[in-house]
Image: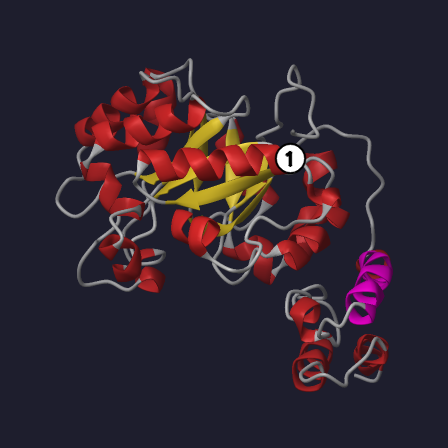
Amino acid sequence: MSSLPSDTAINRTFSIAPMLDWTDKHYRYFARLMSSQLLLYTEMVTTGAIIHGKGDYLAYNQEEHPLALQLGGSNPHDLAVCAKQAAERGYDEINLNVGCPSDRVQNGRFGACLMAEPELVAQCVAAMKDVVDIPVTVKTRIGIDEQDSYEFLTSFVDTVKEVGCDVFIIHARKAWLNGLSPKENREIPALDYPRVYQLKQDFPQLNISINGGVKTLAECQTHLTHLDGVMVGREAYQNPYLLAGVDSQLCGADTPLLSRDDVLQKMIPYIEKHLANGGKLNHITRHMTGLYQGQPGSRAWRRYLSENSHGTEPGIEVVYKAREAMNKQ
């Protein structure tokens, strides 16, 4: 079961958004080195992949805890099967994706289109809660297409909370299910932070986190004066050293600040183990290109890693040479 005692609440002050192809177990290990307090989420994993796929879609590193599994699906039975497996594997939370707007997800009748079916979402949550003793949470948008009134959002939340869901992560944009790509849906619909603040005022008993467009810890601090938590996506990936300040600046922990070079050195044994087990260097280094963002020579670091980490031959020396390339700038 979960590595967290049942009477220990998960710290939801700061979390990293589930991001397809980005927040895999290697990135999550990297992120955890910089913050012991943040809550990590997997990429979205579909119920079909877990039940019918040939790979191990629930694999993770023990160091990643606390760790939430984000599930994509709309069949209550299948979601319950997957949630039970995840709880048995030690995950600390199950999160239902009600926010992804891609065509593929819509065709599978899950993601953001589920906002139009709050009763079904409630059934899905209830089915999972029946078989696990870890939190079951929902990540959603503020609306979809023309259904974007505050009343629509509150009706959705009101329905889902009735089955015992008391944690919601709200992406503060609506989703256009037709006409915009997933990338455009992360950028074009206007952010509406006050709407999420109002939701917390109207549902004070719920734990509500906000997601969307957050780039600095100072912005996080502002949101936390209104809400319970902040979820950061792209900035946490593209500028990962942001995470080094989370524990001290947001969570009140007396944690020494690691330098970027400290983080790099802590990654070396992990990379070496991965290589020794037959893994490829770029499986890990692709997540590390942003480590020195904003520092002198960062472009040389990024370029060297990107150009020399592919294939089966590159070894740990590529990482050292990329760091040396920075010093030559």
In this view of the protein, can residue 174 be seen by the observer?
no
Q: Amino acid at mark 1?
A: Gly
Local secondary structure at mark 1: loop
Residue 181 on image: x %, y %: 28, 64
Residue at 49%, 47% (x, y): give it. 214
Front-most of residues 69 and 89: 89
Q: Main secondary structure of the magenta part?
A: helix
Residue at 34%, 51% (x, y): give it. 100
Front-most of residues 53 and 153: 53
Does 127 sit left or right of 110 as displayed?
right
Q: Quadrant of residue 120?
A: top left
Picture colour scheme: secondary structure
Residue 15 on image: x %, y %: 57, 40
Residue 15 painted magenta: no
Residue at 60%, 33% (x, y): give it. 88
> Magenta span covers which residues?
263-276
Q: Which residue has dot 1 on it?
A: 90
Residue 270 on image: x %, y %: 81, 60
- Indicate whether 158 appears above or below 3: above
Residue 274 painted magenta: yes
